[in-house]
């Protein structure tokens, strides 16, 4: 499987108020706050990581929350929809919960034979809950209010909206090892058989749709998973040989990354499983304190003064 991507690693989005973001994803959706750190390129801004118990690849949603950020607008050249896998029979629970917390949602529908429920986070980021055709065996993170029989299991897939799907599809199939699965209208589904979950990429073709505008409530990039740095660098060679510009390897503390913009405009990342989220906190204390990369540790007091309180 060295010529294949192991599905999704993580997805990163932009938010507005940090506390609102933490409250929604930990309390309403019931995800675990895995890490509370800072944007490596902007240490005055948080970088939050949410996921399952240990931050398994394919469950990790991350945010850069910019206080007072204006709303972005989803459009072409952007990941526009994040889908989570949930157990069969859980929609009633989630609809009641969305009603309780005044969350905007749509009535359940079906896509490729799978029931789904669309809703928006407080910044307008579009999310879905999907009951997959094949039962998802992953163990969810649970809370006092969100139990295992209804909890999200991690990503089901992600939708990319594009003016022309063909160049992006070629990256998925020729470089990443995805296969075309099926089509419905202007939606084309691609899947990898290298993993059982977080394996789906939907491409929606909208030639006349305006380009997306980044801001709160939009996705910044999507990251694909590889097991280690050796495989990461093999993919760097493959991407470079295809004529696309790709970064050098970047150390993100919890994984190593490469970045490139695919022809349709979406920022792609390739990220490793190693070293993982247990390198700087005990597993039972993940997300409990502000963690800074070494280059910013000497500025901790200043950074802590700048960052908004999220307790």
Image: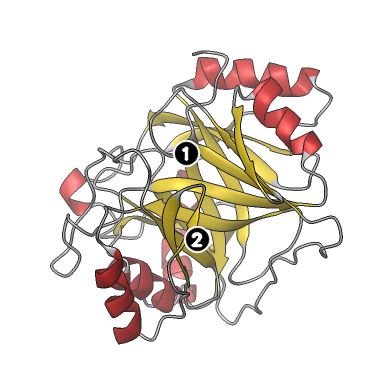
Q: In the image, is residue 17 above or below residue 273?
A: below
Identified at 16% across, 49% down, the residue is: 284
Q: Quadrant of the C terminus?
A: bottom left
x 54%, y 54%: residue: 12
Work out how far the residue at label 2 is from the one at label 1, CA to CA, in angstroms: 14 Å
Residue 193, label in figure: none
Q: Decide if residue 257 is in sight here.
A: yes
Secondary structure under badge 1? strand
96 to the left or right of 166: left
Spot occupied by residue 61 in the image (x, y as percentages of width and height): 44, 53
User: Visible in this render: residue 292?
Assistant: no
Q: Residue furthest left?
A: 144
Horizontal side of residue 263 vs 193, given as left or right:
right
In the picture provided, is 234 more to the left or to the right than 165?
A: left
Report whether 199 appears left or right of 206.
left
Mark 2 lies on residue: 63
* Residue 20 image point, x, y percent: 41, 78
In this rendering, is residue 237 above or below 121? above
Checking the image for residue 9, the label placed there is 1
The correct choice, above or below, for 284 with respect to 2 in the image is below
Image location of residue 237, percent across then percent down: 70, 17
Q: Earlier in the sequence, mark 2 or mark 1?
A: 1
**Element carrying mark 2:** strand
Q: Of circles 2 and 1, which is in front?
A: 1
Cβ–Cβ below 8 Å for labels 2 and 1?
no
Residue in the foreground of this view, choosing between 278 and 221: 221
Q: Residue at x 44, y 39 (%)?
A: 198
**Callout 1 environment at 10 Å: few (<14), some (14 to 19), or many (20+)?**
many
């Amino acid at each position: 499987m060295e010529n294949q991507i192991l599905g999704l690693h993580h997805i990163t989005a932009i938010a507005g108020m940090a506390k609102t973001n933490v409250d929604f994803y930990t309390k309403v959706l019931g995800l675990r706050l895995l890490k509370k750190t800072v944007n490596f390129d902007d240490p005055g801004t948080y970088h939050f990581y949410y996921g399952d118990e240990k931050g398994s690849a394919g469950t990790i949603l991350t945010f850069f929350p910019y206080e007072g950020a204006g709303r972005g607008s989803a459009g072409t050249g952007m990941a526009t929809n994040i889908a989570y896998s949930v157990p069969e029979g859980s929609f009633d629970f989630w609809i009641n919960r969305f009603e309780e917390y005044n969350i905007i949602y749509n009535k359940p529908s079906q896509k490729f034979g799978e029931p789904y429920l669309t809703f928006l986070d407080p910044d307008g980021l579009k999310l879905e809950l999907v009951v997959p055709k094949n039962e998802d065996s992953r163990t969810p993170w649970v809370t006092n209010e969100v139990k295992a029989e209804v909890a999200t299991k991690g990503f089901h897939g992600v939708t990319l909206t594009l003016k022309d799907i063909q160049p992006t599809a070629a990256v998925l199939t020729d470089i990443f090892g995805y296969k075309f699965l099926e089509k419905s209208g202007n939606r084309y589904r691609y899947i990898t058989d290298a993993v059982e979950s977080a394996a789906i990429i939907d491409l929606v073709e909208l030639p006349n749709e305006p380009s997306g505008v980044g801001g709160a409530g939009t996705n910044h990039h999507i990251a694909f998973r590889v097991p280690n740095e050796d495989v990461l660098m093999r993919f760097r060679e493959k991407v470079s040989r295809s004529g696309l510009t790709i970064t050098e390897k970047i150390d993100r503390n919890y994984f190593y990354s490469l970045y490139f913009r695919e022809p349709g405009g979406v920022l792609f990342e390739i990220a490793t499983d190693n070293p993982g989220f247990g390198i700087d906190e005990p597993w039972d204390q993940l997300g409990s304190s502000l963690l800074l990369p070494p280059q910013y540790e000497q500025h901790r007091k200043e950074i802590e003064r700048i960052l908004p309180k999220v307790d």
